Amino acid sequence: QVQLVESGGGLVQAGGSLRLSCAASGVWFRYFAMAWYRQAPGKQRELVAGITGGGNTNYAESVKGRFTISRDSNADTLFLQMNSLKPEDTGVYHCNARSEVSGTDYWGQGTQVTVSA
């Protein structure tokens, strides 16, 4: 059974940093694509960053050069290091795991990130 639990969100001033974590049980990173999505109030959920089972990464244009996605296979944890945060980065950040075998999606409950101007 896959379970994703995010942590690390909070309130930060513009220009600050946060590190999000996603504890992933029941997930073998080698066979899952992992990603962070965010949803701002009144907006659709959007992809922020992703990492494939093979380790290839991709980022939304708006976060390139500021955010870094990584994973620790020994700790079964996905990370998102967020630097130079902007107010437009505010939203609920969700961890996503997609089986590269079945295509099944799994979601965490989300963690709130608020960036003040």
Image: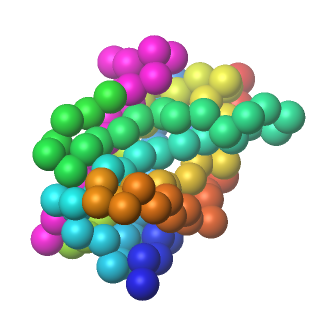
Q: Is residue 5 above or below residue 113?
A: below
Q: How many marks?
A: 0
Residue 9 visible in the snapshot: no
Q: Is residue 83 above or below residue 34?
A: above
* Residue at image coords 73%, 35%: 44
Q: Quadrant of the C terminus?
A: top right
Q: Is residue 67 above or below residue 76?
A: above
* Residue at image coords 50%, 64%: 106
* Residue at image coords 52%, 35%: 47
Q: Quadrant of residue 24?
A: bottom left
Q: Position of residue 60 (x, y in %)?
A: 46, 23
Q: Position of residue 35 (x, y in %)?
A: 41, 46
| Residue 72 as seen in the image, left or right of residue 62 | left
| Residue 81 as seen in the image, left or right of residue 71 | right
Q: Quadrant of the N terminus?
A: bottom left
- Outermost bottom residue: 1
Describe the colour scheme in one phrase: rainbow
- The residue closer to the viewer here, 80 or 54, is 54
Q: Quadrant of residue 27?
A: bottom left
Q: Position of residue 102 (x, y in %)?
A: 37, 62
- The residue closer to the viewer here, 100 or 1, is 100
What are the residue bounds of the magenta stretch? 59-74
